[in-house]
Image (cartoon, helix red, strand yellow):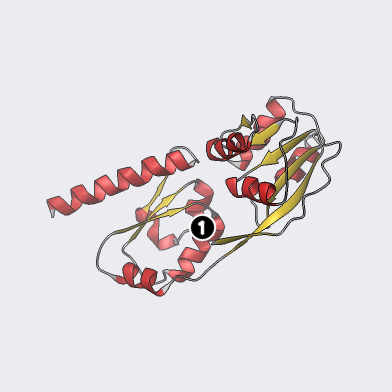
Amino acid sequence: MSIHVTGPLPDLEGAGGLIFTSANALDAYKALGGRVLDLPIIAVGVSTGKAAKSFGFEPHIAGGTAEQLVAFVLEHGFSGPLVHLRGETAIGDIARRLTEAGVATSESVLYDQVLEVFAPDTREALSQDRPVIAPVFSPRTAAQLCRESEGLDNIAFAAISQAVAEALPTDAKDRIRIAAQPSRDGMTELVTEMITDAVSLERRQ
């Protein structure tokens, strides 16, 4: 996947807070001339929160998923209007759900996520007779991976969430593991465990 900043930035005059659901959104906000504002900043999870803090914000950090973000906003009493700054493709329908729950929220697309085909050297690596671990961070990339890796049964999938796991091949259930926490740290822990298990299995064989 490649990221293409599209913009434009919306008019944030009168906004009661900003929602970011990816570090890519922070990068796009910065590239489009966005500045640090004295507004509540709500990040979906730890990684996005770190990106927001690096930019200069003091973010409030939710649990890592769209569902947890919606619950976080409602539980902590944030008042609208909020603005969700996101990519062209997003899951969770956050703006609609918050608005229907009584917190007026709009959304603005700052970037596009373009799916790319595998490079020849990637295909060659995947076709070799050795274990492969594929960390997958979204249902969309899961679907792309299914198309690109058809017929390859040596791939073990590390899914960041249940939604991602459900988008992976149905015949690969015994090769899919889900991160304990839907974050980059959670994925790092999972992939590390999977590598350790693969090495241990190889040594026993």
Task: Give the quadrant of residue 41.
Answer: top right
Nearest the viewer among 163 and 2 is 2
From what the image shows, is residue 3 above or below residue 203?
below
Q: Residue 73, percent across and down?
A: 70, 31
* Point 58% across, 45% down: residue: 23
Q: How many marks?
A: 1
Q: Amino acid at mark 1?
A: Ala
For residue 74, which quarter of the picture? top right
Q: In which quarter of the view is residue 40 placed?
A: top right
| Relative to 17, 128 lies left or right | left
Residue 95: % across, % down: 75, 44
Residue at far right of view: 14
Q: Nearer the viewer, residue 8 or 90?
A: 8
Residue 72 locus on image (x, y percent): 65, 30
Specify the farthest residue to the left: 204
Q: Where does the N terminus fall, quadrant-wise?
A: bottom right
Q: Is residue 133 something one can see in this rendering?
A: yes
Please give the residue where the numbered disc 1 appears in the rendered image.
Answer: 167
Taking 99 as reference, is 176 left or right? left
Please tell me how crowded label 1 is: few (under 14), some (14-19), or many (20+) other residues with Cα within 10 Å: some
Q: Secondary structure at mark 1?
A: helix
Residue 152 in picture, x, y percent from top left: 35, 69
**What residue is shown at x 65% (from left), y 52% (from top)?**
90
Q: Is 150 on the left or on the right of 71, as rendered? A: left
Tell which residue pokes out farthest to the top in this image. Answer: 76
Quadrant in the picture for the C terminus: bottom left
Q: Is residue 179 visible?
A: no
